[in-house]
Amino acid sequence: MKKSILLLLATTLCFFSCKKDELYFDQATCITNISTIDPEDGLKSSQTVVIQDGKITKVAATNELHLSKDNNIIDGTGKYMIPGLWDAHVHFAYMENLAPRMFDLFLVYGITSVRDTGGKTAFVKKWRDKSLQNPTTTPRVKYAGPLLDGMPNVYDGSAPTRPELSVGLATIEDVESVINNLVDNEVDLLKAYEMLSPEQFKALTASAKKNNLKVTGHVPLSMDVISASDAGLNSIEHMRNLELSCATNSDVLYEQRKKLLHDGRKDQGGILRSRIHSAQRTIAVENYSQEKADEVLDALYKNQTWQIPTSALNTAMTERPFVRAEFQESFQYLPDSTERKWKERIAAFSANPASETNHAWTEYNYKMINQINEKGIGIMAGTDCPIFFLTPGRSLHEELAVLAKSGLSNLEVLRTATTRPAEYFNIEGELGRIQESMLADLLILYANPLDDINNTLKIDAVIKQGNVMDRAALDKKLAILDNK
């Protein structure tokens, strides 16, 4: 009898104790039994992640966190969580008819933040403003305003492939005036372009520093890479013109470029730039010097001049991702006229095999990305979508795959699209990791991207600042796009 009373008492005490230990998180989403992949800490199994008020408020082992059944619980068993992805090189203004679809395309493919690297201020700013007004239903947008180019400027609206994305600056005084206007429009960075003179470029970087803005862009054709980096270029898009400074004959190429720029100063900017690239790029790759490359990369590391390789674009002439059926599935979500034109152009393009020059360029890109990573130079994943058949959203996953093929580990690849962009914009304390107090921009995947980077495409849910869009919600967005 005494034993029975003691057992009943112990059971009763345990009941009240266990009930007391159960946790309830008000107006929260609790994702249990999920494997988290933090880009810095790596894989942790059987975790519970609690999201409240758009932020991650708790991360703990599931067996250590006793949740009340009254919580809103999502079972993450067998699934994987990573931070929301960035596409660090997009253009809303390149195809203005496509821009209204880009937000949903980014989100359904897990891109919760983008960096627009060139377009008319008024056009791009309206998308940035929309993202600020709707932080849980749209991707975050950081923007540069127009390309800041010299004269003649390249993207002057003179051809369909050269829409009006830039402003041509004739003098040094123009630089300050245009930047003041961009500051008034609250841009997040500045984009320097290829026809700037050295004097204009240095005025641009000085103004950017004064206004606490980073400068990204292409190395001006009037400069070499080290000079541009030393002058304050914070990042280089496409590794553009890097090869010109890594050749044994880089000094000769530089003198030739100056003459070509002078002789072509009355030509259209796009034509002049193409003429110079055609005259020098292949020669530079054929005369690649490891000694010169090491000198350049050491300077980039010293100056912390990061790289956005757009590697899927740079290798597209040989790799041709756009001919694959699973890649073309994304075309159905584009405007009908765009889908038709892209498929017609791809068919014509595919009729011609890649040249030896194309293969040499691809090989150079793979080698250079690997060396940049080994040097410890920051890399961000970006696509240049929607240029060259790169569907917004879908193309970022192609970029990740090419970065992995270049030699980055899958965890390093994830960093290029999560922690690195957050660091670039000095918001690493609030975004890009699976940690308490971070903004809840997250993806839930069916499969482990550390096993295969292509698993970033196997999306079960997208979470944007706490708003959970499950597979059904994402498919509904795609259905709407498909029917527009």
Image (cartoon, rainbow, N blue to C red):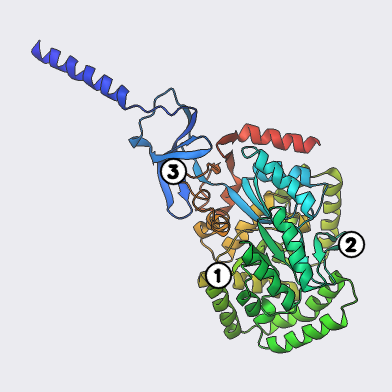
Q: Mark 3 — residue? A: 436
Q: Amino acid at mark 1?
A: Gln
Disc 1 crowd, CA 10 A, few/some/many (<14, 14-19, 20+): some
Distance CA(mark 2)–CA(mark 3)? 49 Å
- The residue depicted at 71 percent of the width and 63 percent of the height is 191
Give the side of residue 26 with respect to residue 292, left or right.
left
Please provide percent x and percent y for residue 126: 75, 45
Quarter in which the N terminus is drawn:
top left
Disc 2 crowd, CA 10 A, few/some/many (<14, 14-19, 20+): few
Asked if marks 1 and 3 touch (Cβ < 8 Å), the reply is no
Please provide percent x and percent y for residue 125: 74, 49
Q: Mark 1 — residue? A: 304
Q: Amino acid at mark 3?
A: Glu
Dot 1 falls on a residue whose secondary structure is loop
Toward the viewer: 161 or 357? Answer: 161
- Residue 195 visible, this orientation: no
Toward the viewer: 77 or 296? Answer: 296
Asked if marks 2 and 3 touch (Cβ < 8 Å), the reply is no
Task: Please tell me which of labels 1 and 3 falls first in the chain.
Answer: 1
Q: Does 463 appear above or below 212?
A: above
Q: Mark 2 — residue? A: 159
- Residue 152 visible, this orientation: yes
